[in-house]
Image (cartoon, rainbow, N blue to C red):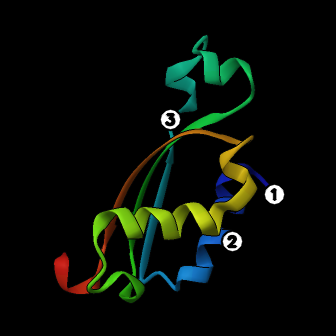
């Protein structure tokens, strides 16, 4: 299972209606995080679980779902998190 698949599996806890993960690690070759093995990713996620929650709380929910991946496999994560009525 690759990193994106692991991310998708863990983010399933948030019951996303839509989930897009782009691996941009190849654009950061030589970057400090890339040397230590962590990748760079763009995430767009739509979930009813985000309704009524501020952006900071949405990000915390995502970080919690990804758990230890945030310490090793993921060096940088750009997040766009929406409730269904916001798209």
Residue where numbered disc 2 is placed? 9
Residue where numbered disc 1 is placed? 1
Estimate the x, y position of residue 17 in percent, counting from the top left.
42, 84
Structural distance between the alpha carbons of marks 3 and 2: 19 Å
In-front residue for pair 55/33: 55
Q: Which quarter shows the N terminus?
A: bottom right
Q: Nearer the viewer, mark 2 or mark 1?
A: 2
The reply, left or right, for residue 22 in relation to residue 73 is: left
Structural distance between the alpha carbons of marks 2 and 1: 10 Å
SS assignment at label 2:
helix
- Residue pictured at 46% horizontal, 69% vertical: 19
- Residue pictured at 71% horizontal, 43% vertical: 71
The reply, left or right, for residue 10 in relation to residue 53 is: right
Residue extending furthest toward the top:
30
Residue where numbered disc 3 is placed? 24
The answer to whether the residues at label 3 and label 1 have Cβ atoms under 8 Å apart is: no
From this view, report whether residue 38 is shown above or below residue 60: above
In-front residue for pair 12/75: 75
- Residue pictured at 59% horizontal, 71% vertical: 11
Q: Which quarter shows the C terminus?
A: bottom left
The answer to whether the residues at label 2 and label 1 have Cβ atoms under 8 Å apart is: yes
In-front residue for pair 21/56: 56
Lower position in the chain sequence, tag 2 or tag 1: 1
SS assignment at label 1:
loop
The reply, left or right, for residue 73 in relation to residue 29 is: right
Q: How many marks?
A: 3
């Amino acid at each position: 299972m690759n990193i994106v698949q692991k991310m998708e599996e863990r983010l399933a806890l948030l019951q996303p209606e839509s989930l897009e993960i782009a691996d941009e690690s190849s654009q950061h070759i030589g970057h400090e995080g890339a040397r230590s093995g962590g990748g760079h990713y763009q995430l767009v996620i739509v979930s009813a679980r985000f309704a009524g929650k501020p952006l900071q709380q949405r990000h915390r929910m995502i970080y919690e779902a990804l758990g230890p991946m945030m310490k090793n496999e993921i060096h940088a994560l750009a997040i766009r998190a929406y409730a269904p009525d916001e798209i």
